[in-house]
Image (cartoon, rainbow, N blue to C red):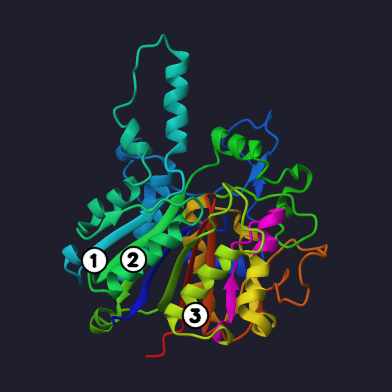
Amino acid sequence: MRRVVITGLGAVTPLGNDVGTFWNALVAGTSGANLITKFDTTHFKTKFACELKNFDPLIYIEKKELNRLDPAAVYAMASGTQAVEDSGIISSFNPDRVGVLWSSGIGGILTFEQEISAYAKGNGTPRFNPFFIPKMIPDISAGHISMKYGFRGPNFSPVAACASSTIAIADAFMYIKYGRIDACVAGGSEAAITEGGIGGFNAMKALSERNDDFATASRPFDATRDGFVMGEGGCGLVLEELEHALKRGAKIYCEIVGSGLTADAHHLTAPHPEGLGAYNVMKNAIEEAGLSVEEIDYVNVHGTSTPLGDIAELKAIKQLFGDAAYKMNISSTKSQTGHLLGAAGAIEAIACIKSVQEDIIPPTINFTTPDENIDQKLNLTLNTAQKRTVNTALSNTFGFGGHNASAVFKKYNG
């Protein structure tokens, strides 16, 4: 079976607009939350989010093209371009053997809101922008990246709410592993800090409403957590077959060795109370990797800071890992980045890959008050990064509808 390595990374995130800046801020325990600047939040229950800062799209996209792209696609083009250029695959591959699997949980929600709002204010005559549909649909980012570079392999967007981009990475891993392609740009982007995005998640009571202390509002595992903080951005990876990477002398960040996909089959939005789907998906990913639970050094959990989700996931970890659960590090980097929805899996995959590369565990910040329902003997990497040898890291992402996805990254040792 072919082995698959990571040879390129790209990121535009609430903590920085390149991988190095993002990683340094993550290790430092930086909060990406601030008051929303994109619209008037006077009448909204939640007035803060993790927005991008100082992001210049013109670095990646010509001005005349910018109006034809929703921000979700802009973030895809920025992070995808970074990943492709970082990998150096542009001149080294048969374009028919390179795929682009790029996901978004929602897609162009801003475009949808703007077009429907304009129509509702009109006289009933349907005067829609001809770019309305291609700006909005969630698969369009994969199309844009493939057109920019001429990559003609598999091209699509798996959509599974907040598990979407982990599934894109898992699919890319499988396509390369089984010989369908030699390399793939995989990742996700999301731009849901809009009136509809914030208002919709407010209506579900999924978002934190800690407006008086927004910088610490994302607080996974803390007894006072009250919901997640919306984030935005895009992150991309280049996955590549090992022998091709070695032949061209590519930089190798790490190896991807396992993935898993399961369903809770339980509830529209709530996790299985015992973490059944989470247990199964981690078990499947670790088994495919050919590892024992004792060999996992770090789990980057879904950890959204919702009251039910954090408890169910940690139950699953304790059940699967047993005594090994107390020896590894666990952290939720959503405490810093917020929740990037369909892009969450990609940004957290990069957190895992950098942990394996740098032997540092980024922290879960904003923890102050223990939750009596959470085992405090678990090493949740609270508030401060920890150094340790990280040979393997597991990334979890779960989505509304009961979708679960995991991926295992391993130090490349030849």
Residue that mark 2 sits on: 172
Q: Is residue 49 magenta?
A: no
Chain part drawn in magenta: 295-312
Q: Which mark is residue 357?
A: 3
Q: Considering only order in the chain, which callout, 2 or 3, is on the residue closer to the N terminus?
A: 2
Q: Quadrant of the C terminus?
A: bottom left
Q: Nearer the viewer, mark 3 or mark 2?
A: 2
Q: Residue visible at 34% across and 49% down?
A: 141
Residue that mark 1 sits on: 90
Q: Are marks 1 and 2 in contact (CB under 8 Å)?
A: no
Q: Is residue 265 left or right of residue 218?
A: left
Amino acid carrying label 2: it is: Ala
Q: Is residue 84 left or right of residue 208?
A: left
Q: Position of residue 253 (x, y in %)?
A: 42, 78
Q: Is residue 275 left or right of residue 151?
A: right
Q: Considering only order in the chain, which callout, 3 or 1, is on the residue closer to the N terminus?
A: 1
Q: Tell me the crowding category of disc 3: few under 14, some 14 to 19, or many 20 or more residues within 10 angstroms, Cα based.
A: some
Element type where label 3 sits in the image: helix
Q: Position of residue 196 (x, y in %)?
A: 55, 33
Amino acid carrying label 3: it is: Gln
